[in-house]
Amino acid sequence: MIIKNIQLKEGFIGFLILSISMTMLLINLASTLEMSITTPSQTFRVNQSDTINHYLGVENKNPYPIQIQIQPPEKLNIIFHNTLNFTLQPNKTRNINYTITPNEHGNFTHFIGVMFISEEQSFGLQAKINLIVYPNQKSPFWMLSIIIILGISLIIIFFILSELPLHKRSGFLIHSQLPKGLTSTPKAYQAVPALQENEE
């Protein structure tokens, strides 16, 4: 009986050591799983009528293949142009192209889920998308364009007037002040008061 008890204890201790060793091995394997998203956060400032063409980048830094699954946001009008379930080979990077069409103006934050699956474990990461969507009629880009066009127009008008001779500029100003219906030249217009004095 004593010998059997010793054998059972030795067997239990051996099993315990083996379990601990396997657990440590799995922990080491899990810790070596290195995956990353090369575009973890993107911010887009667009008009409501614009479309966004960009990509989501994923990278496998491990010496073995990893299964990738892309999970699109539920409330974002986004179209992916590549497969959303694929195998990424060791030390490779892949870009998944997409197009976003804003539905409304405002500030929005969305997340694209990325699942990394290996034989040992699986885990997920998220890519963040910040959308700043301007109303079409109030876009600061259009306002800036209008201001620039007006400024250039004023500079051109000022340049043209500065190139005119002084008497033409004076004549233009006097002619612009003539009473309605009177179309005489500035010289004739100035002679009218003199004729009236002679008649008196």
Image (cartoon, grey):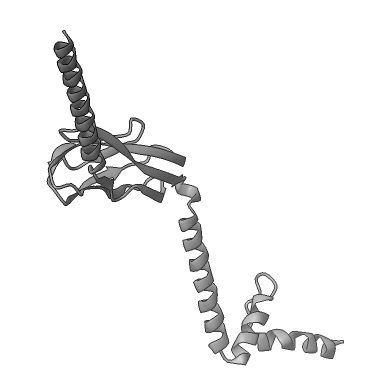
Which residue, as the protein is rendered here, is positioned at the far front? 2
Displayed quadrant of residue 110: top left
In the drawing, does residue 75 fall left or right of residue 6?
right
Q: Position of residue 72 (x, y in %)?
A: 28, 34
Residue at the image position 62 percent from the left and 91 percent from the top: 166
Q: Number of callouts in the render?
A: 0
Q: Position of residue 94 (x, y in %)?
A: 18, 49
Which residue, as the protein is rendered here, is positioned at the far right? 200
> In the depicted view, which residue is nearer to us: 153 or 28?
28
Residue at the image position 14 percent from the left and 12 percent from the top: 4
Q: Position of residue 198 (x, y in %)?
A: 83, 91
> In the depicted view, which residue is nearer to us: 87 or 131?
87
Please tell me whether residue 2 is drawn above or below residue 78 in the rendered image: above
Would you say residue 146 is visible in this rendering?
yes
Would you say residue 71 is visible in this rendering?
no
The quarter of the picture where the C terminus appears is bottom right
